[in-house]
Image (cartoon, grey):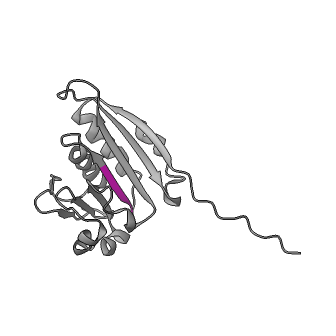
Amino acid sequence: MEVPAAPHRAAEPLSVAITVNSPEEMRELGRRLAGLLRAGDLVMLTGELGAGKTTLTRGLGEGLGVRGAVTSPTFVIARVHPSLGDGPPLVHVDAYRLGGGLDEMEDLDLDVSLPESVIVVEWGEGKVEELTEDRLEVVIHRAQGDTTDEVRHVTATGLGARWVAARLETLAG
Protein backbone atom coordinates (compact mmCIF):
# COMPACT_ATOMS: atom_id res chain seq x y z
CA MET A 1 0.00 0.00 0.00
CA GLU A 2 1.38 3.38 -1.00
CA VAL A 3 1.38 6.13 1.62
CA PRO A 4 0.39 9.51 0.18
CA ALA A 5 2.98 12.24 0.47
CA ALA A 6 2.40 14.93 3.04
CA PRO A 7 0.87 18.05 1.51
CA HIS A 8 3.35 20.78 0.67
CA ARG A 9 3.13 23.63 3.15
CA ALA A 10 4.31 27.10 2.27
CA ALA A 11 7.27 28.19 4.34
CA GLU A 12 6.37 30.48 7.22
CA PRO A 13 7.81 33.98 6.89
CA LEU A 14 10.93 34.47 8.99
CA SER A 15 11.56 37.90 10.50
CA VAL A 16 14.30 39.64 12.42
CA ALA A 17 14.06 43.07 14.06
CA ILE A 18 17.13 45.30 14.29
CA THR A 19 17.66 48.71 15.85
CA VAL A 20 20.05 50.89 13.88
CA ASN A 21 21.51 53.95 15.62
CA SER A 22 23.31 55.79 12.79
CA PRO A 23 23.78 55.93 9.02
CA GLU A 24 27.07 54.02 9.42
CA GLU A 25 25.23 51.24 11.25
CA MET A 26 22.69 51.17 8.41
CA ARG A 27 25.54 50.74 5.91
CA GLU A 28 27.00 47.99 8.07
CA LEU A 29 23.62 46.26 8.10
CA GLY A 30 23.69 46.41 4.30
CA ARG A 31 27.18 44.85 4.27
CA ARG A 32 25.96 42.01 6.54
CA LEU A 33 22.90 41.53 4.35
CA ALA A 34 25.12 41.20 1.28
CA GLY A 35 26.67 38.12 2.88
CA LEU A 36 23.27 36.39 2.77
CA LEU A 37 22.36 37.35 -0.80
CA ARG A 38 22.92 35.45 -4.01
CA ALA A 39 21.95 35.77 -7.65
CA GLY A 40 18.18 35.55 -8.02
CA ASP A 41 17.35 37.38 -4.81
CA LEU A 42 14.78 40.16 -4.71
CA VAL A 43 14.95 42.64 -1.83
CA MET A 44 12.05 45.08 -1.35
CA LEU A 45 12.79 48.16 0.75
CA THR A 46 9.95 50.08 2.38
CA GLY A 47 10.22 53.22 4.47
CA GLU A 48 9.40 56.90 4.41
CA LEU A 49 11.59 59.46 2.65
CA GLY A 50 14.90 59.70 4.48
CA ALA A 51 14.44 56.42 6.33
CA GLY A 52 17.73 54.98 5.08
CA LYS A 53 16.78 52.77 2.13
CA THR A 54 19.55 54.07 -0.12
CA THR A 55 22.07 54.04 2.75
CA LEU A 56 21.27 50.36 3.34
CA THR A 57 21.65 49.68 -0.39
CA ARG A 58 24.98 51.52 -0.43
CA GLY A 59 26.28 49.11 2.23
CA LEU A 60 24.81 46.20 0.33
CA GLY A 61 26.71 47.29 -2.79
CA GLU A 62 29.93 47.52 -0.75
CA GLY A 63 29.33 44.05 0.64
CA LEU A 64 28.61 42.60 -2.80
CA GLY A 65 31.71 44.29 -4.22
CA VAL A 66 30.03 46.07 -7.12
CA ARG A 67 31.30 48.87 -9.34
CA GLY A 68 30.05 52.40 -9.09
CA ALA A 69 28.73 54.59 -6.32
CA VAL A 70 25.32 53.43 -5.12
CA THR A 71 23.09 56.49 -5.11
CA SER A 72 19.36 56.94 -5.28
CA PRO A 73 18.18 56.09 -8.82
CA THR A 74 15.02 58.19 -8.44
CA PHE A 75 15.33 60.00 -11.77
CA VAL A 76 16.77 57.13 -13.82
CA ILE A 77 14.50 54.56 -12.07
CA ALA A 78 17.14 51.76 -12.19
CA ARG A 79 20.90 51.36 -12.16
CA VAL A 80 22.95 48.23 -12.75
CA HIS A 81 26.16 47.90 -10.74
CA PRO A 82 28.32 45.12 -12.22
CA SER A 83 30.33 42.95 -9.86
CA LEU A 84 34.03 43.68 -9.51
CA GLY A 85 34.59 40.00 -8.71
CA ASP A 86 32.72 36.81 -9.32
CA GLY A 87 29.53 37.79 -7.48
CA PRO A 88 26.22 38.85 -8.96
CA PRO A 89 25.56 42.37 -10.24
CA LEU A 90 23.32 44.65 -8.19
CA VAL A 91 20.25 46.10 -9.88
CA HIS A 92 19.05 49.07 -7.78
CA VAL A 93 15.53 50.27 -8.59
CA ASP A 94 13.64 53.23 -7.18
CA ALA A 95 9.94 52.75 -7.91
CA TYR A 96 8.87 55.94 -6.10
CA ARG A 97 7.73 57.71 -9.28
CA LEU A 98 6.07 54.64 -10.77
CA GLY A 99 2.37 54.47 -10.10
CA GLY A 100 1.22 51.16 -11.55
CA GLY A 101 2.10 47.65 -10.50
CA LEU A 102 4.21 45.12 -12.34
CA ASP A 103 2.81 46.26 -15.72
CA GLU A 104 4.63 49.59 -15.43
CA MET A 105 7.77 47.82 -14.19
CA GLU A 106 7.89 45.46 -17.19
CA ASP A 107 9.89 47.94 -19.26
CA LEU A 108 12.75 47.48 -16.77
CA ASP A 109 12.96 43.74 -17.62
CA LEU A 110 13.50 42.85 -13.97
CA ASP A 111 12.18 39.35 -14.62
CA VAL A 112 15.00 38.86 -17.15
CA SER A 113 17.67 40.28 -14.82
CA LEU A 114 16.52 38.46 -11.67
CA PRO A 115 18.10 35.01 -12.21
CA GLU A 116 21.66 36.37 -12.47
CA SER A 117 21.38 39.52 -10.29
CA VAL A 118 20.50 40.74 -6.85
CA ILE A 119 17.63 43.17 -7.33
CA VAL A 120 16.89 45.80 -4.69
CA VAL A 121 13.69 47.80 -5.15
CA GLU A 122 12.99 50.89 -3.07
CA TRP A 123 9.28 51.71 -2.85
CA GLY A 124 8.48 48.34 -4.44
CA GLU A 125 5.55 47.38 -2.24
CA GLY A 126 2.53 46.61 -4.43
CA LYS A 127 4.66 46.78 -7.57
CA VAL A 128 7.12 43.87 -7.74
CA GLU A 129 5.76 41.05 -5.57
CA GLU A 130 4.70 39.13 -8.66
CA LEU A 131 8.32 38.76 -9.79
CA THR A 132 8.91 35.96 -7.28
CA GLU A 133 7.32 34.51 -4.17
CA ASP A 134 10.82 34.21 -2.66
CA ARG A 135 11.85 37.67 -1.55
CA LEU A 136 13.21 39.61 1.38
CA GLU A 137 11.04 42.49 2.55
CA VAL A 138 12.87 45.11 4.60
CA VAL A 139 10.80 47.77 6.37
CA ILE A 140 12.56 50.75 7.94
CA HIS A 141 10.82 52.96 10.51
CA ARG A 142 12.15 56.05 12.19
CA ALA A 143 12.13 55.95 15.97
CA GLN A 144 9.13 57.67 17.54
CA GLY A 145 9.60 61.33 18.30
CA ASP A 146 12.03 63.76 16.72
CA THR A 147 12.28 63.31 12.94
CA THR A 148 15.97 64.32 13.04
CA ASP A 149 16.75 61.30 15.24
CA GLU A 150 19.02 58.82 13.45
CA VAL A 151 17.59 55.75 15.22
CA ARG A 152 15.77 53.37 12.89
CA HIS A 153 13.86 50.16 13.51
CA VAL A 154 14.41 47.67 10.71
CA THR A 155 12.39 44.51 10.18
CA ALA A 156 13.64 42.02 7.60
CA THR A 157 11.15 39.31 6.61
CA GLY A 158 12.11 36.42 4.36
CA LEU A 159 9.23 35.09 2.28
CA GLY A 160 9.32 31.78 0.45
CA ALA A 161 11.41 28.64 0.61
CA ARG A 162 14.63 30.48 -0.32
CA TRP A 163 14.71 32.22 3.06
CA VAL A 164 13.91 29.23 5.31
CA ALA A 165 17.59 28.47 6.01
CA ALA A 166 19.04 31.91 5.23
CA ARG A 167 19.98 32.70 8.87
CA LEU A 168 18.38 36.14 8.96
CA GLU A 169 19.23 36.33 12.66
CA THR A 170 22.85 37.06 11.64
CA LEU A 171 21.67 40.49 10.49
CA ALA A 172 21.18 41.52 14.11
CA GLY A 173 24.97 41.46 14.49
Q: Residue furthest front?
A: 100
Tell me if residue 43 is in the magenta stretch. yes
Residue found at x 33% / y 58%:
126
Magenta span: predominant SS is strand
Which quarter of the rendering shows the C terminus? top left
User: What count of labels does the image hold?
Assistant: 0
Q: Is residue 39 visible?
A: no
Question: What segment carries the magenta color?
Answer: 41-45
On the picture, is 127 further left or further right than 73?
A: right
Residue found at x 51% / y 50%:
13
Residue 76 percent across, percent down from the top left: 12, 63
Q: Measured along the vertical axis of the image, is residue 85 above or below residue 56? A: below
Residue 46 percent across, percent down from the top left: 30, 48
Q: Residue furthest top?
A: 145
Q: Is residue 101 visible?
A: yes
On the picture, is 9 further left or further right than 22?
A: right
Residue 131 percent across, percent down from the top left: 37, 68
Residue 99 percent across, percent down from the top left: 21, 62
Image quarter for residue 102?
Answer: bottom left
Depth check: 104 or 89 in front? 104
Depth check: 67 or 39 in front? 39
Depth check: 26 or 14 in front? 14
Q: Measured along the vertical axis of the image, is residue 10 above or below residue 55? A: below
Residue found at x 27% / y 38%:
26
Image quarter for residue 9?
Answer: bottom right
Tell me if residue 25 is in the magenta stretch. no
Q: Measured along the vertical axis of the image, is residue 112 above or below residue 32? A: below
Q: Residue furthest left?
A: 75
Depth check: 31 or 71 in front? 71
Which quarter of the rendering shows the N terminus? bottom right
